[in-house]
Image (cartoon, helix red, strand yellow):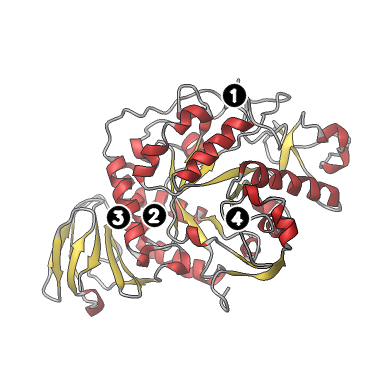
Amino acid sequence: MKTLKNLLPLLAIISLGLFASCQNQQKSVISEATVELTKNPDWAKDAVIYEVNTRQYTEAGTFEAFQEHLPRLKALGVDILWFMPIYPIGEKNRKGTLGSYYSIRDYKAVNPEFGDLEAFKTLVDKAHEMGFEVILDWVANHTSFDHAWTTEHPDWYNRDEHGEIVSPFDWTDVADLNYENNPALWDAMIDAMKFWVREANIDGFRCDVAGMVPVAFWEKARTELDEIKPVFMLAEDEGEPALTNMAFGANYGWELHHIFNKMAQGEKTTADLWAYFEKNDSIFAPDVFRMSFTSNHDENSWNGTVFERLGDGTKAFAVMSYTIPGFPLIYNGQEAGLDKRLEFFEKDQISWNQGSDYADLYTKLNQIKKDNPALWNADYGGTIASIDINIPQNVLAFSREKDDNKVIVYINVTAEPQQITVSSAAAFGNFKELLSGQEMVIDETTAFDIGPWAYYVLKEVR
């Protein structure tokens, strides 16, 4: 949106009487009768998102056990806790012993494996007290085969020529919903989303395969949700830009993620990154948060750990995901150097005693992001500008600047040491390297070394 920063093209008129019925679930009271709805809440401007796999997080695999980790996550510096689906899992056509979180039997209930509604509400309240925001994974495209809707509303599902409910793709444990000419389905799904905002005071949703559900549905959902409280909406999608016109403030950088993987294998270079940035700017509005990540639940379980995919470049791409324009994600366990593929349908606990230095890296990156408005999300931060160096294919070199804050980044994207000389006068000056504390002076006479997969994150000292 180019005319009013971060404002949706709509205005919700909310009466004080309507608001009073739900203000107990609000974190702040809106006293005005007229409320402007924003694409992204202001609290998200410098936020880092953290994905929680409740089943695998602790030995108990419960909300109560996870709650003990909140102080550690606060010290890590993350802001948004995204919980993978917490709802009861279908038994019919179940995969594995425990089933997929994304095969949902009841949208308004809690998987007893994790606890109950009161335990989740207690967790949300505690998270809010500590300054976190909480979003839930929402699966609007399909249900389990034993969801009540399959018998109560059979017309809400897609069927084959024999009249049998079908699955999307090869996801044989889920039943494909049909949104065409089914307004009652739209209302029921939105009602279930509103339940969690009202009852548990959550702050938004990460929406699974959002592009497989009509844009108009999501826009209706967003409008109605924001009448309760401003929500943060993240679409698991990159192929439908219209989703970010109004319904979603953030979406996935899937293409960027795949470029990371191929760069690590020597199959792509910085030229592919710059082409991506240019393409991204031509498709999405400046205020859209594009989530950058080196792992998530799908990538870890099905395509490999970060060490399998990124190898010795794992830290370099983590730094990149924090410093390029975007909205960084940590998948649980990455801060402990998670080096195994977590089972998707079985219990497979994360090991938190691996003695890695990743917690220190992510803590520093989170603080650097907070301290430097140039690195804030989307157009809250600075635009990216290339820096002319002698080896542009081997080292990603760029600056981002916002007001009086300027950050310059150099990342060696190869397994070989490089020597950099800079020819952009805009990159000359006195700098502090923010990860190490090293002071550097760079001018036209400077040549400096950067090791294999190494990086410098420099703040200009004025």
- Cα–Cα span, label 2 and label 3: 13 Å
Tell me the quadrant of the picture where the C terminus can be found: bottom left
Q: Is residue 225 above or below residue 201?
A: below
The numbered mark, 1 or 2, whose residue comes first in the sequence reads 1
Residue sitting at the far left: 445
Answer above or below: position of 121 versus 385.
above
What residue is disc 3 on? 413
- As helix, strand or loop, the secondary structure at mark 4 comes to loop
Q: CA distance from mark 4 to mark 2?
A: 24 Å
Query: In the rendered image, which quarter is residue 321 located in?
Result: bottom left
User: What secondary structure is found at the residue carrying circle 2?
Assistant: helix
* Nearer to me, 97 or 84: 84
The reply to whether the C-beta atoms of the residues labelled 1 and 3 are less than 8 Å apart is no
Circle 2 is placed at which residue position?
Answer: 321
Residue at x-position 68% and y-position 57%: 222
- Position of residue 370 in the picture relative to residue 116 (left or right): left
Q: From the viewer's perspective, tell me whether residue 295 is left or right of residue 236.
A: left
For marks 4 and 2 on the same chain, the one whose residue lies earlier in the sequence: 4
Q: Is residue 359 above or below residue 279?
A: above
Q: Position of residue 308 (x, y in %)?
A: 38, 38
Label 3 secondary element: loop
Q: What is the x, y in percent for residue 73?
A: 39, 41
Disc 4 vs disc 3: which is toward the camera? Answer: 4
Location of mark 1 (residue): 113
For image coordinates 33% across by 46% down, the residue present is 362
Corner quadrant of residue 274: bottom left
Q: Which residue is mark 4?
A: 231
Q: Mark 1 to mark 3: distance in Å?
A: 43 Å
Q: Earlier in the sequence, mark 1 or mark 4?
A: 1
Three-letter amino acid code at the position of disc 1: Glu
Q: For mark 1, give the secondary structure.
A: loop
Q: CA distance from mark 4 to mark 3?
A: 37 Å
